[in-house]
Amino acid sequence: MASALITGGTSGIGLAFATELATQGYDLVLVARDQGRLDQVAAELSRDHGCRVETLQADLAVRDDLEPIIARLGDPDRPVDVLVNNAGFGLNASLLDADVALQERAMDVMCTAVLILAAAAGRAMKTRGQGIIVNVSSVSAWIVKGNYSAIKRWVLTYTQALALELDGTGVQATAVCPGWVKTEFHERAGVARPSLPAWVWVDAGEIARSALRDAGRGRVISVPTRRWKLAVWVLEHSPAAFPRAIAQRINRSRSVH
C-alpha cells in the first residue's frame, strides 16, 4: 500500500492532510513533537480509516531529530510516496527584537527542515521514478508581514526550484499557499485572529484536497479556492505598495484586540 509522511500531522492543516490521505487509502507516517498527541491521533486515524499509522517524535528545529525522518524517507524497503512538509507556527515577534531565538527556530522548522526533508524524499522518489512532495507555503508569501512572509516566500521559491530539478523524473513538487485557515494557528502563535470577513476563512480539509489534486495534475503552485486565487492574482499584478498596505491593515486589526 502507498504511504505518506506528514510533518506536523497531528493538528490543523497537517491533520487534514493525514485524514485526506488516509481516506484515499494511504498508510501514514506522522511526525510531531508531542508523543502523547501522536499516539492519540494515530489510534483515531487507524480506527476510522483502517490504515497503518507510524509515528516519529521529533523537534524539527533540532538537527539530530531530522536523522530518523531522513532515514525513513530513504528506506528502500518502505517507500514513502507522498511527503507533506507542513510543520510550522506563526510569528508574533518584531523584526527588531534583540532576542532572535524564536525567529531562528521558525527558520529551522519552516526553511531548513523543509530543505533537508524534501531533498531526502526527492532523491528516493527520483530513484523510483514517482512521488509527490507538498510544501506548505502561504498567501502571506505575496505580502510583507514580518519574517513569516519572508519564510513562506522562501518555501514558495524553493519549491519552484525543486520542481524544475525534478522535471521529467516522475516526481512532483508543489507549494500549497492557503489564505486564512480555520485552525488553532493564531491561538498557538499568541495573536488574535484578524478582523476579516467570514468568507476569507478556508477549511483545512479543503486545502488538503486542493493541494493533492493540484499535485496530481502536475501544478507547482496550489492556491485553494477561487477567491484566494483571485487575491493572489491581484497581489501579483498590483503596485508594490498594495501588499504593504495589506500587511499594515492586518497589523492594525490585531492591535485593537
Image (tube, grey):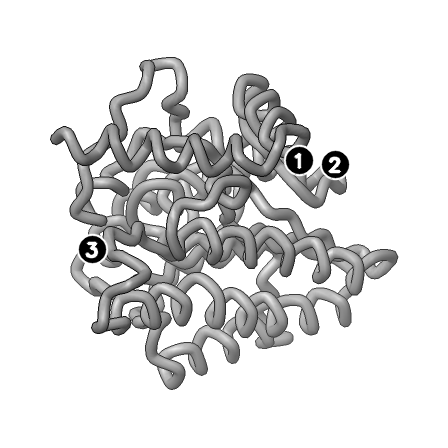
Amino acid on which the number 2 mark rests in the picture: Arg
Is the residue marked by circle 2 packed among few (<14), some (14-19), or many (20+) residues within 10 Å? few
Amino acid on which the number 3 mark rests in the picture: Arg
The mark that comes first in sequence, 3 or 2, is 3
Q: Secondary structure at mark 1?
A: helix
Residue named by callout 3 = 37
Contact flag, marks 1 and 2 (Cβ < 8 Å): yes
Q: Secondary structure at mark 2?
A: loop
Q: Is residue 207 above or below residue 75?
A: above
Q: Secondary structure at mark 3?
A: helix
Residue named by callout 2 = 217
Contact flag, marks 3 and 2 (Cβ < 8 Å): no
Q: Residue at x 76, y 42 (%)?
A: 218
Number of labelled discs?
3
- Whole-angstrom CA distance, mark 3 to mark 2, is 33 Å
Amino acid on which the number 1 mark rests in the picture: Asp
- Which mark's residue is nearer the viewer, 3 or 2? 2
The mark that comes first in sequence, 3 or 1, is 3
- Whole-angstrom CA distance, mark 3 to mark 1, is 30 Å
For the view shown, which residue lies furthest in the left direction? 257
Q: Position of residue 147 (x, y in %)?
A: 40, 56
For the view shown, which residue lies furthest in the right direction? 168
Q: Residue at x 29, y 45 (%)?
A: 11
- Which mark's residue is nearer the viewer, 3 or 1? 1
Q: Is residue 206 left or right of residue 15?
A: right
- Whole-angstrom CA distance, mark 1 to mark 2, is 5 Å
Q: Position of residue 117 (x, y in %)?
A: 53, 70
Residue named by callout 1 = 214
Q: Is residue 3 visible?
A: no
Q: Position of residue 207 (x, y in %)?
A: 48, 32
Q: Quadrant of residue 169?
A: bottom right
Q: Position of residue 178 (x, y in %)?
A: 48, 35
